[in-house]
Structures are given as structure tokens and as C-alpha cells.
Amino acid sequence: MESQLKAIKLAALDDPWYIEHTKRVSPFNNFDGILTHLLYSWLLNTTVPMGLCTAGDSSLYCSKLARKSEQTTLGGASMNRVVLIDDEEHALELLEMMLRDLGNVEIVGKYINPLLAIEDIKQHQLDAVFLDIEMPGMKGVDVARAIQAAHPGVHIIFTTAFTEYAVEAFEIQSLDYLLKPIRMERLQHSIKRLEEAVMGRGTAKEGNEGSEGPRICCMGGFSIQLGKSETTQVSWRTLKEKELCALLVHRSGQTVERAVIMEALWPESDAEKARSYLHTCISLLRKNIRESGLPLALYKTGNGYSLDCGSVVCDVSELEGLLDMTLEGKGLGVQQFEQIVALYNGDYLESCDFIWAFRRREELVHKYVHALRKLSQSFYKKSQLSYTLECLRRVVAISPDSEQDSRKLMKLHMEMGNRKEAIQVYRQLELEVRERLNIEMEQETVRLYQQLISSNYRRGS
């Protein structure tokens, strides 16, 4: 084994790519650690003479990646601005080298300390953050949530040596999940997805340029934006005032009986106190609407109240319209998919503990999943595999115990040459079904896994 390693190092020293990159890492403190990773990267991304590999090594080390494709700028698009976060310095430096080789990427900053990164990121315009998921002191998923809160719209790409965080990563709408050591072709695919996502976001912004008025947001929480800036929102004097407004929006202009409101908002209070609380909240809400200059009208009709939203756009109405179109087979395409994903930035009133919203939340999740399945079928027929993959990943993140969806995702990974990711999907499914549900997996799933690990998988099987 030691003689093989020496032979591999000698072969690497004849490669201009390896020589150039060793020169670039020499000034770093952790030179040996970076050099080890660099050698491994060279093994993964070049042709190694077969005599230097054992039979077991050849499938891993002897993959061919054309050097020409590494140097090609993807599609001639504008530079993608990214930040790198990892607690290991050599991993940061290696990722930086690989990204610079791909081109079309501007590295705005590199951070070992995630807390410092979160603070600094607020000052930059970014497209994405490459983020290690396992770091001491603060988990990568928690860092991702903090980044998304401070910088809405920034895409998260996780980099990790661990497979068990995949479902949690996609639950927070991460763009990709790269397993270390990162292969160049896999990183190239991730950058392509980033470009597609950024282009979709730009298209959505262009479509909304003329719509700078107030907007009611129900997906992922509840807020009313007063203008183009997401930070300019209605301030609620009490949580119950906010819940009252959300309930009236939820009923879409219909009159809600006073007794129904009182039972929904103050179920543990007696009727007299609940009536007093309601009158106070109605007064606060009317004052808030007036002072904010919102074109909303709060009406009292008989023993109930209604909220007329007029021309104010509500995100859940837009989303349901797009989902219904998709389920009817209309407008199936990339733009519609991007619009749906942009609107579905969390479950319906997700961060609000409103019991009355649970049923509609579940209905929307069900409709969203079915729409993603419909879109995945359409994309697959058009050979748009990256979008097919994204649809199926989102479905599996929502329904991690769905064996049918997981099998489709596993097969697609294998078709795209991502055997490791296919096995990762199976292991996550196994965790959900066998360990959490305590039931046996379907025979079809087990047979597919056996094909994967024996490398006998064939497309269409």
C-alpha cells in the first residue's frame, strides 16, 4: 500500500494541474493537511494509471474528468458571489481552489468562525454560502437558519463528510448537499444549479418590479409587508392582535362570528373576558391599519367581523393558483417551478402556533407535494434532470418515509452517476421506516438497494 501511495504521488507530480495547486497552497500554515486533500482531489478528478490502483480502488479513483470541462466557465453567466464556512482551514482552501478552477465564482469571504461569518454576511450581497454542517459550538443547520434570517434569498450549499443530516438540510430549503471529499464534477453540477436558481430569482424579481405595494405573507409565518423591502412590516402591539388579523385573512373576506373568534383566540377565558379582549384587539387592529396606510377594511357585520383585503396581494393565494394550474397540467415548466418554490418558503403560518390553521396547513402540504411530483414527471420527460432531482428531493424532505418517492430519487441519482447519493437516500429511508416507524421496508425497495450496492443497476429496472 505504501509503495502504491508513493507511485501515485510521483504520477501527480507530472500533472501540471497538481503542480500549480501545490504552489498555491505552499504559503498556508496547514500545508501538509491541504496537500493531503489536494492529492485526494487529484485522484478523484483525473485519470490515474490503472497499474497504480487496486481492483477495489479503481471505481473510486480512476474516474475520468476532462480537464477542459473543469476550466470552462459555465454558460458565460455573470459571477456568482459566495462565502465559504468550515472549521477546517485546509478544507476551506481546497474548496476555494476547486471553485476558482471552475470559474464564474467570486469568493467574497472565508470563515472558520461561523458567528463571525453570520455577522459579516449582513454587509455583503451574496448568491450562496458553502457551509460545513458539522462544526464545534454551532451546527451548520443552525448557522444556515441564522444566515437565511439575516439575508433572505441566499442559497445554502452544505459540505460535509456525514450523510445523516440530509433530510434536515433539505427541510430548511438548502440548494445542495455535497459529500466530502468533493468531486469536481459534483461541484460543477452544484454551481450549475446555483446559476439556475439565481436566474429564476432574478426573473421573479423582474416580474414583481411593478408590485411594490403592501403584501400579506402567510407562508412560513404571518406578516404584512408595507412595501418592496421585506424589513418594512406592520408592527403588532400584541400577539393576539396579530392572530386576529391572521384569522380574518385565513377566512378570505368571509364574516367570522364573534363567538368563533373568541373560542379560537381565548379558549380558556370566560365569555365576558374574551369579549373584552376581542374589542381591544379589534380597536388595535383598526388603528394599525389606519396608521400603516394599508388599503384594508375591517367590517362588523351582525355578530361577526370580516377583513376586506382589496387589491393587497396574499402569497398563499398566489401559491394556490400556481399549484392548481400545475395539478391541472397547465404551464408545467421551469418558471412555474421557480415561482412555486419561491412562494413556498415554509409551511402555511408555520412559525405561528394557531391551532385553527392546522387543517389548511396539511391541505397545502398535500397539494404542494402532488404538484412537485407532477413537475418532476414533466421535467424527466424533457430530460431536465437537475430540476427533476430538485423536485424529488423536496418531496422526500417532506415525506421521508415515502418509499415510492425515495425509490424514484435513488434511481435518478444512479442515472446521473451519483451512486453515493443514491445509497444515502436509502439509508435515510431505512432510518425513517425501520427505526422510527418500526416496520419492514417494501421488497421492491430492498431489491433496488441490493442492485445499487452490487453495481448491477440498469436504467429502467
Image (cartoon, grey):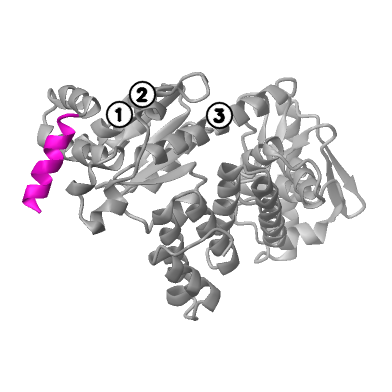
Residue at image point 45% right, 32% down:
128
Q: Residues within 10 Å of mark 1 (few under 14, many from 20)?
A: some
Q: Nearer the viewer, residue 205 or 196?
A: 196
Of the numbered discs 1 and 2, the one sitting upstream in the chain is 1
Q: Is residue 393 above or below residue 44?
A: below
Furthest residue toward bottom: 439
For the residue labelled by badge 1, is the local secondary structure a helix, a strand or a loop? helix
Q: Which mark is residue 96?
A: 1
Q: Residues within 10 Å of mark 3 (few under 14, many from 20)?
A: some
Q: Is residue 395 above or below residue 236?
A: below
Q: Nearer the viewer, residue 221 or 443?
A: 443
The stretch of residues the image draws in magenta is 1-14
Furthest residue toward right: 302
Cα distance between the residues tagged 3 and 2: 16 Å
Q: Amino acid at mark 1?
A: Glu
The residue tagged 3 is 198
Cα distance between the residues tagged 3 and 1: 20 Å
Magenta highlight on residue 194: no
